[in-house]
Each structure stands twice: as C-alpha cells, then as structure tokens.
Amino acid sequence: MKEISRRKLLGRIATGSAGLALSSLTAQGQMNDVAQQTVRAFRGQHQPKPLPFDPAKLKGISEKIIRSHWENNYGGSVKALNAVEQRLAQMMKEREMPAYLYGELKREELIRTCSVVLHEKYFANLGGDNRPGGKGLDLIKQWFGSYEGWEAEFKRTANALGGGSGWVIFAYNLHTGEVHNYWAADHAHNPTLGYPLLVLDMYEHSYHMDYGAAAAKYVDAFMQNVNWEEVSRRAEAAMKVSLA
C-alpha cells in the first residue's frame, strides 16, 4: 500500500509539474503573442501617398511650393510618425517608464498622426476646377443656406489663421449630423467625431513662397482648385456612418 501510494504520489507530482510547466509555457506564449499584437500598432511603416493631381496645373499655387510642401512638411510628418511609433514599440518592452516621459511621446504620436491625415486630406481635395456640386453642395445649402454664404464663412475662418498656423476643416459631425467650418489652431484640434470634408492648410509653409504674408490671396487661390468630387465622396461616406 505504501509503495502504491508512493507511486501514485510521484505520478501526481510529475503530472502536476508537467501541467505547471505547460501552463507556464502557455502563459509565456500568450504574453509574447499579446506583446507582438500590441507592437503592431507601433510598426512605424507609413509611406507618403503620391500627389493625386499634376502640381503644375493648379491655378495660383505654384508647382514649387506644392512639391516642397509635399516632400518637406508632409513627408517630414510621415518620417516623424514612424520614428515615434518605433520608439513606442521599444518602450513596450520596458517595465518602468516615467509617466511624464511617456506622455510627451504620446503627445507627439497624436500631433504627427493628425498632421499626416490632414495633409493627405488637403492634397486629395486639390486639383479640381471649383465646380461645387454633389452631396457636398447639398450639405452646404442645408446648413448655410447658400454656397456663397458658406464660402464667405470658410474664407473668414481661414483668414483668421493668416500669419500664424493651423487648419480650416469643413467637417460633418458624426454625432450631431451638422456641418461646420472649424478653426484648428494646430494639427491636434478637430471636433470630436468630426469627419473632414474639405481641408485647408493655413500654416505659412503652404503659401509663403507664392504670396509672402498675403494669406488671403492664397485662400482665394485654394478655392479655385477645390476638387468637389472628392468633397462629395467624403460627404457620402460620412453620412453612411453617421451616428446622428
């Protein structure tokens, strides 16, 4: 009986040890899987999108400034975002990290992400001949009464940013179902659930080569090149996911 009990006990210990080892390996594997899945969010592999129009054919905005804007400002933001994401991936492996240091990097992540998105929206809504129509114009008439009234308010908002930095974002709010011309002081300012329909870059790098400090002339030139088919495409997409 003692021998049998001893054998049973040893067998149970062996089985238990094997189970613990298997559980440990499983837990470790799960931790590795989670780490890999998390780090994917910080892969840092963004690539600049090519210009969707011929920059030599814009009215009142030179090819030189468009190419400089695309390469240096937008391209710089893409590179910076990749660098920030790669650093965040490294930090995921660090057990201890001062909150204030991590917070600064997360702030940069937000700013660089917004800069990339807004620049891509900006370039994508250029290259047109400013013929308002489609769902974009329908929304303008619904909420501003007329295209002329909306345009005047859009330009006024843009000129309020002249000589400084920021964006004008004509957006459909997925929460309220309304459209507004929003004033954004920098890359990180946009209304919650605001879906950009038309984006105007008002940082000086967008116009200083062509117009110096005459920001209003740049705003007028921008309006001549709006691609309203793109604006309407965004409006239709926004309304499909509207929460209002």
Image (cartoon, helix red, strand yellow):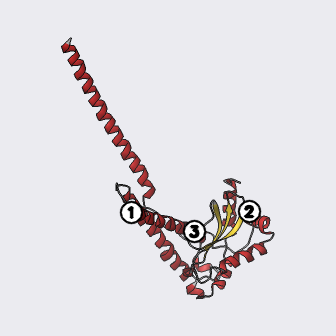
Please name the residue that numbered disc 1 is placed on. 87
Residue 97 vertical placement versus 148 (above, below): above
At label 3, which amino acid type do we have? Answer: Leu
User: Can you tell which mark lies on residue 189?
Assistant: none
At label 1, which amino acid type do we have? Answer: Arg
Q: Distance between the residues labelled 1 and 2?
A: 42 Å
Whether residue 243 can be seen here: yes
Question: How many numbered callouts?
Answer: 3
How far across and how far down the image is residue 154, in percent? 70, 75
**Which badge, 3 or 2, comes first in the chain's sequence?**
3
Q: Nearer the viewer, residue 236 or 105?
A: 105
**Which badge, 1 or 2, comes first in the chain's sequence?**
1
Q: How far apart are marks 3 and 2 (CA)?
A: 21 Å
Mark in front: 3 vs 1: 1
Question: Where is residue 51, by image quadrant?
Answer: bottom right
Q: Is mark 1 on a helix, strand or loop?
A: helix
Q: Residue at 77% x, 64% y: name it.
A: 138
**Which badge, 3 or 1, comes first in the chain's sequence?**
1
How far across and how far down the image is residue 15, in percent? 28, 26
Q: How far apart are marks 3 and 1 (CA)?
A: 23 Å
User: Can you tell which mark lies on residue 135?
Assistant: 2
Please name the residue that numbered disc 3 is placed on. 118
